Image: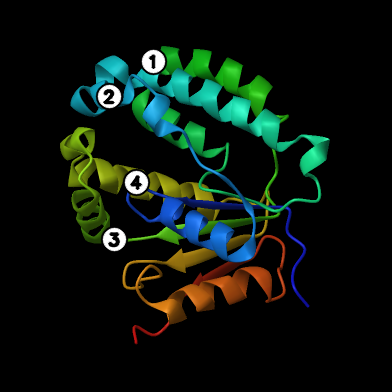
């Protein structure tokens, strides 16, 4: 029996492939695609050049954009439509804790606390884990100019923060995919395997499932 999923969210560090996987799954399953609108954040290129100076502005711009999308996703007209997104709202605070100083974080938390209570709750979250080496390779291959300032050290910080967050995550059922050595873009079997786990296997609440398919 196919799982009844109204909202599937895919997460991972920069370069993990979450947007690509969301696009593939939505196309193959006739789902509505909701992507993080990072291109519309005017502070993001400046942030990668100077994290300390532009972290707060970047964070608030993302928070406002993500919250607006979340409001649209909770529309009653969409209850019977499957949505696949490349982020969860709670991810916003992972970056805030990593990049904001204490005073900025306190102000941010006041705003975030109001918004998070009315954000959309996924029926299932997919977390793509990956090595820093694979993340750097993916970032280099897509060639976004402003991402050239991303360092392996920053990606390691993010990876550690993401792992810590999802180790304690219990809001929705969670599937963890080790994406370091899989290729769901060019290997149809890898994509099919992931799809099977999401839509056809029993979903157990608050259970972490590590998926490491064969490389063939």
Q: Which mark is residue 57?
A: 1
Which callout, 3 or 4, points at the residue further toward the start of the chain?
4
Image x and y of residue 4, in percent: 77, 63
Q: Which residue is mark 4?
A: 14
Vertical order, 58 against 132 (above or below): above
Which residue is nearer to you in this view: 155 or 79?
A: 79
Q: Which residue is mark 2?
A: 47
Q: Are marks 2 and 1 in contact (CB under 8 Å)?
A: yes
Residue at image point 35% right, 50% down: 159
Which residue is nearer to you in this view: 188 or 49?
A: 188
Where on the picture, by quarter, is residue 197?
bottom right
Image x and y of residue 192, in percent: 52, 77
Q: Are marks 3 and 4 in contact (CB under 8 Å)?
A: no
Image position of 44 (left or right of 209): left
Q: Which residue is mark 3?
A: 131
Secondary structure at badge 1 equals helix
Q: Residues within 10 Å of mark 2 (few under 14, many from 20)?
A: many
Which callout, 1 or 4, points at the residue further toward the start of the chain?
4
Residue at image point 75% right, 73% down: 2
Which callout, 3 or 1, points at the residue further toward the start of the chain?
1
């Amino acid at each position: 029996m196919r799982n009844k999923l109204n909202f599937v969210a895919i997460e991972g560090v920069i370069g993990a492939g979450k947007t690509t996987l969301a696009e593939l799954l939505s196309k193959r399953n006739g789902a509505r695609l909701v992507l993080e609108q990072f291109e519309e954040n005017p502070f993001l290129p400046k942030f990668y050049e100077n994290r300390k100076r532009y972290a707060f502005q970047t964070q608030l711009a993302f928070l406002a954009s993500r919250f607006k999308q979340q409001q649209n996703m909770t529309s009653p007209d969409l209850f019977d439509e499957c949505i696949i997104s490349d982020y969860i709202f709670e991810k916003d605070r992972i970056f805030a804790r990593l990049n904001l100083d204490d005073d900025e974080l306190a102000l941010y938390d006041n705003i975030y606390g109001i918004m998070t209570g009315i954000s959309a709750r996924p029926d299932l979250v997919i977390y793509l884990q990956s090595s820093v080496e694979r993340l750097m390779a993916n970032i280099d291959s897509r060639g976004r100019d402003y991402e050239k300032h991303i360092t392996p050290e920053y990606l390691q910080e993010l990876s550690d923060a993401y792992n810590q967050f999802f180790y304690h995550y219990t809001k929705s059922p969670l599937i963890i995919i080790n994406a370091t050595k899989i290729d769901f873009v060019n290997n149809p079997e890898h994509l099919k395997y992931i799809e099977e786990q999401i839509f056809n296997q029993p979903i157990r609440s608050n259970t972490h499932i590590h998926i490491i398919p064969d490389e063939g």
